[in-house]
Every structure is written in structure tokens, then in C-alpha cells.
Amino acid sequence: MALAKASLLIAVLLIWQFAGLPDYVLSPLEIARHFVQALGSAELYEHIGASLARSLPGFAIGSFLGAALGLAAGTARWFDRMLSPAVFLTYPVPKIVMLPIFMLWFGIGDLSKVLIIALACFYPVFINAYYGVKATRTILVWSALNMGATPASVFRRVVLPSAAPMIFAGMRVALALSFIVMFAAEMINARTGLGYLIRIAENSLRFDLMYVSLLAIAILGYAGDRLVRTAHSRLLAWQPA
Amino acid sequence: MLLNRLLPFLLVAVVLAIWEAAARSGLWNRLLFPSLVNIFQELVLFFTNSAYLMEAWVSLYRALGGFALAAVVGIFLGMLMGRSKLVAGMLDPFFSGTYAVPKLALFPIFIFVFGIGSLSKVALVFLECLYPIVIMSYAGARSVNRVLLWSAQNMGASRADTLRRVVIPATAPFIFAGFRVAVPVAMIVVVITEMVASADGLGYLVIYSLSSLKTDRMLAVVVVIAILGYLLDKAVVLARDRLIYWEKLDTYYV
């Protein structure tokens, strides 16, 4: 069974390695060779650092605001009526279109990119926190009130742990989104970072550099996702992953 | 009571009022902060100009084309994965492993393979929309109630009948949840790819207006993109409520 699962991947890799490829597609071994070589040089780490310095603060700010406001909106009805329609209305809108406006207001440096990543990460976490609070089982709340808990205590001990799994699911989506938006913002306008690296690699026809940065961002995305899943299973040990 | 009814519009009205006040105050350059009146004028110009409407149609057609392809392939793959453990074992690691990878990074390669026209953008939209649809269809096909399947077999249904009358209706809510995630993704990917590498479409219009320092036109195009995204989402919800009238599934994610 395990062999069958791996067979597809192995077949694809073998075909890729030995097929007659056009210039711009490198075989897996060549990509691996270039990647190992790039790991030794400082250039790749500079760009990775620059990219992460934008996406992680943006992810943190957006997730924090999304969780806080989503929890508030799920709890307080007047806040819900004020904020939720605006959030749900603007949810289908591609947030990346705000990038030119943000560049106008906050300059073409890092601040505009961090803010647009924060904006994009806000939505999944807000929606998940909101629905997480709404899905708290009433019987748990009634039990807590019965045993003399104050509303603050009910929120902290019942609502928050109940909404936490959905918030983590939202953060997984937000993390993937933060990489995408960071990448897009860097491809459009940047002077450092992985998106910028891919753009200049494409412009100067340096395919080795292009595939190396592609692999770097794939590894970053996968590692980030696994990290959030690990944090989820550690902090919320009572829940199945 | 009246305040309660008006509360949703209160936030929007306050934000718009602050914007207009800031724009007219003269603190910032007119270019940085276009007045709402100018933006509205450009919006009207947009809808009465056939060249601009053509650009909107180009973006829409790329997004919907890629989404339609992804829907066909995604539903097929997802349901295949849901009904066959072998296929699920082979494809699921691929999908869940590469889910967190920004597929936008492949766009330069797509430009090399498919050229700089519409096809590279449609291909990227296809790839990006495939994931939510496959993941949700797989989840749906996997969780068909076995009792329903046994009942159908008991009553003498063939494999094809079971598929058509039991599996597909049971999976349909999940498929539409996948659609609801995939449609905004399609719009986002189209706009991004047009901002990065294109000579037509709404994303290109945004960049072009910004480069010509016509910020009121740029914001008008942003509003148009927002309206388009909102209408597409409403269309999916409408289709879902008509086709799956027996179940109101209100989840955005699994």
C-alpha cells in the first residue's frame, strides 16, 4: 500500500528526470544541485530573511486582530451587527487590489506590504473565530453559569477553548495566505525577498535561480503549515488534530 | 430600534465620511487622497466606456474559464479519491503536502510554457482553484452515509444508479462549499497575475492608472473588482440554494 502511494511520486520524478525537456524546465537532480549550492551562499538567506520579515509580522498582526475582533463579534451582539456585515461583504473582494493604494499611503517600502498581508490574514481568522464562538455548545455555557461563573469566566474557560480549534484552522489558512500575498506583493514591487528573486531570475533567464527560490518558498510554506499543526496539537491536546 | 437597524451601515458611513473629510481638508495631495466625488465620476465613466467594460469582461472570462476547468477536473478527481482508497492514498499526500505552497510562485514558469497571454493566467487559476474543490469533494465523497448506500443496494440499484441518486446528492453540499472558496480565489489570482504580467484586464488597469497617477480611476477600478467579486459570490450562493434546496450549509471551511 505504501509502495502504491509512493509510486505516483516516483513515476513523476523519473519521467521528469529523463524526458527531453525544453531549456526552461530543469530536471530534479539539477534543481537539487543548484539548491544545495545556494544553501551555502549568503544570498538566499538574505532574501528569505527579507521575505519572512514581511510575512510573519503581517500574519501575526492580522491573525491577532482577526481573532480578537472575531471573538468580540461572536460574543457581543451590537458589535456583531456593526462589524460583521462589512467583513462578510468585503470577504469575496481580492485584498491584493488594495496594494497600490497602500503603496500610495505608506510608501513603497516594507510597511505597505506588511499591512496588506495583515489585511489578507485578518479575514479567515475573523470568520473562523466568529463561527467558533457561535458554535459553542449552550449546555456548556449553562453548566458554567449554574456553577456560579461570571460572564468573564465563562468567556475565558468555556467559549475560548471551544472556539480555539476553529481559530487554529483559520490560522492555517491565514499562514498559507500570508505567503501568497507576500509573494504577490514582492513580485509587483520589491527590492529584496523571494518574490523579487523569482522576478529578476525570470527577467535575466536564470532558471537555476528561479527554481531554487521556488523550492525555497515551497519548503517555507510546507514547514510553516506543519508548525501551525504542531502548535495546534500541542496547545489543544484534547482535540483530534 | 431604528439605531439597531442602521447599525450595519454606521461603520461604512463613518469611514466614508472620514475619507471625504480627509480628502477635502487639503492636508494631503489630491493625488494621494482622491475625493469620493472624483471616484464616483470615474466609476460612471467606467461603466459607460466599452473599452473598459471589455477589460472587465477579459478578467471575468479568465477567472470563470479557469474556475470551470478546475470544477470539472476537481469534482471528478475528488469523487474518485473519495470512492477509491487506492487513488486517495496516491493523491491525498500530494494535495495536502502542496496545499501550503503558494502556487503563484509557478507563474513565471507558466508564462514560459503558455506564453504571456490569457492561457498562462487561466492555467494558474485552474491550479489554484483545483485545491479547494478537490479537497472538499474528497471530504464529501468520503463521508457519504453508508446506510444510504446499503439501502440503495438493497433495493437493487446498479453502481451507476447509486452514483447518480445517492453519492452525487450527498456530496453536492461539500462541492458547493468548495466552489464558494474557489470563486474568490479565482478572482484574486486573475487580478494578481494581471497586475504582474499583462497588457489587458482589470489588474492591468489598476497598475496603469497608478502609473499615470490617475488615482481616482485606480480606486474606481478597485471598486469595480470588489463589486465583481461580491456578485460572483452571491451567484454561487444563489445557485447553491436553488440546486441543493434540501440543506442550508453555511460553512466557509470544512
Image (cartoon, coloured by chain):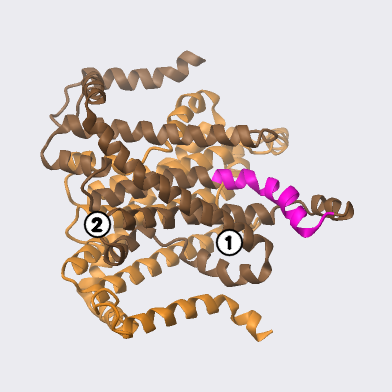
Chain colours: A brown, B orange
Q: CA distance from mark 2 to mark 1?
A: 34 Å
Residue B195 percent location from the top left of the image: 24, 57
Disc 1 sits on a residue from what chain? B
Going 67% across and 55% down the picture, which residue do you hit? Answer: A133
**Residue shown at 53% from the left, 56% from the top:** A66
Above or below: residue B213 compared with residue B146: below
Q: Tell me, yes or no, whether the highlighted magenta stretch contains residue A168.
A: yes
Say which amino acid is labelled 2.
Answer: Met
Residue B131 falls in image quadrant: top left
User: Which residue is denoted by mark 2 in the rendering?
Assistant: B195
Question: Which residues fall within the magenta stretch?
Answer: A149-169
How far across and how far down the image is residue B185, in percent?
A: 40, 52
Query: Mark 2 near mark 1, Cβ–Cβ under 8 Å?
Result: no
> Which chain is disc 2 placed on?
B
Q: Is residue B70 visible?
A: no
The quarter of the rendered structure image containing the C terminus of chain B is top right
Closer to the camera: disc 2 or disc 1? 2
Instruction: Find residue B152 and report its horizontal and vertical position in percent.
Output: 69, 37
Q: Which residue is mark 1?
A: B241
Is disc 1 placed on a helix, strand or loop? helix
Give the main secondary structure, helix, strand or loop, of the magenta stretch: helix
